[in-house]
Amino acid sequence: MTSPHHPPGVPDNSSAPVATPRPRLWSERNMAALYDLLVVHGTYWAMWGVRWPVIAELYRANVSGNHLELAPGTGYLLNRVGMPSETPRLHLLDLHEGPLEVSARRLARFQPVKLQGDVFQPFPLAEDSVDSVAAGMMLHCLPGDSITAKAVVFDNVARVLTPGGRFFGCTVLARDVPMNWFGRLSLRKVNDKQVFCNLGDSLADLRSELEKRFDDVSVTVHGSVGLWQASAR
Ligand SMILES: C[S@@+](CC[C@H](N)C(=O)[O-])C[C@H]1O[C@@H](n2cnc3c(N)ncnc32)[C@H](O)[C@@H]1O
């Protein structure tokens, strides 16, 4: 629904969940010292059943030379894969300063532009201005009782992508995916601690919310992680 004072072309995000910043959790120190070791090389596989090279393949297949990285973390995957251009244009968008600082340092060779903001709000980029957008391991951190409640993020992505531009990413799901006892226990713990908010996130909703907004949607599952790639209309 569009509010009476809403500018045309910009999604109306007034009913989107509200993200609460957690600067201590996502501090520069935690990101630089712990994230790659504990998360990328640790929990990705141990808790959620996906190895980082599988996600790197998704990047390799979809990243462009004019790319927006949502919630870059430490920039680990983009750094491993690189950008297919001699004159790359890279934007990094995150709610927290820590990940922006750490990823910008690591990706300095691409001269990234840092944007501090909430993915629930329209991105500070022009319509049809980027050729690829990645959202790796981000949706499960966002507030909302389902993927549908979080799908305003997909509207924001669709607005900035050029037609045919690629949207790809991955997220830990809690419904319609296999999970062993350790995964279930971990899922409960990270939701109790409000690091994740994904108990209502299902594979079916992920697929259908993407299909509402994008073409050529492909979703695969590794462990309890849904990985997607799609084209902008
Ligand atoms: C689990 S990390 C993912 C990092 C990286 N993309 C990866 O694949 O490992 C989650 C990231 O989401 C960011 N984040 C959390 N809520 C956000 C929001 N509402 N808007 C933008 N970024 C957010 C955090 O600051 C953090 O960088």
Image: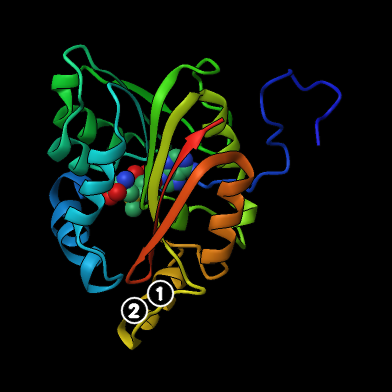
Q: Find the residue positioned furthest to the right.
A: 4
- What residue is drawn where x is 50% and y is 62%? 197
The residue where tag 1 is placed is: 187
From the viewer's side, name the closer residue of 232 and 50.
Answer: 232
Q: Are marks 1 and 2 in contact (CB under 8 Å)?
A: yes
* Horizontal side of residue 72 vs 213, given as left or right: left
Label 1 sits on a secondary structure element that is: helix
On the image, the x and y values in percent for residue 33 come to 13, 49
Give amino acid for label 1: Leu
Q: Quadrant of residue 70?
A: top left
* Horizontal side of residue 48 vs 118, given as left or right: left
Give amino acid for label 2: Gly
From the viewer's side, name the closer residue of 190 and 136.
Answer: 136
- What residue is drawn where x is 20% and y is 43%? 77
The residue where tag 2 is placed is: 183
Q: Quadrant of residue 179?
A: bottom left
On the image, the x and y values in percent for residue 18 come to 61, 46
